[in-house]
Amino acid sequence: RLEIGASCMINYGVSLGCTKSITIGNRCRLGPYVMVVDTGFHELYDRDARPEPQPVVLEDDVWLGAKASVMPGIRIGRASVVGAGSVVTKDVPPFTVVAGVPAVPIKKLNPEKFVVRSMYAEE
């Protein structure tokens, strides 16, 4: 089950490995060559066995920078930003900027300053 919300922008080269469930909220931005997977695809010792999928959720207004990777079972909170090239291995709280390998929080955003605009006049 792959769910993509309204007004999302998914750039070229994005890879969504959805074997069970990936949910992408409204107004999310996925940069070039982002990878989001809900499974590791192969067990470590029995490489013909597939591990149990773990759902991935990107809440509304999430921004994933170019070449960021989101691993199985991750929830990225509303309006959070993942820096380019980062690997997200732990949940990200809302209004948080993370970066690195593995991604770690580097900044908290002020929710009161956050602005939501539609890219479509009729919304």
Image (cartoon, rainbow, N blue to C red):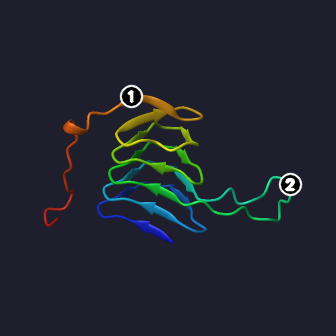
Rendered location of residue 77, percent (x, y): 40, 47
The numbered mark at residue 121 is none
Neighbourhood count class around disc 1 (C-alpha, 10 Å): few under 14, some 14–19, many 20 upward: few
Task: Check the image and report above or below for 31 versus 23.
Answer: above
Of labels 1 and 2, earlier in sequence is 2
Q: Quadrant of the C terminus?
A: bottom left
Q: Amino acid at mark 1?
A: Lys
Rendered location of residue 28, percent (x, y): 36, 53
Q: Is residue 5 left or right of residue 13?
A: left
Q: Amino acid at mark 2?
A: Tyr
**Label 1, on which residue?**
107
Residue at image position (22%, 41%) is 114
Secondary element at image label 2: loop
Alpha carbon separation for disc pair 1 and 2: 38 Å
Among all residues in the image, which is located at the extreme bottom? 1
**Label 2, on which residue?**
45
Rendered location of residue 25, percent (x, y): 37, 59
Rendered location of residue 18, percent (x, y): 57, 65
Q: 78 or 2: nearer the eye? A: 78
Residue at image position (55%, 61%) is 55
Secondary element at image label 1: strand
Neighbourhood count class around disc 2 (C-alpha, 10 Å): few under 14, some 14–19, many 20 upward: few
Label 1–label 2 contact, CB within 8 A: no
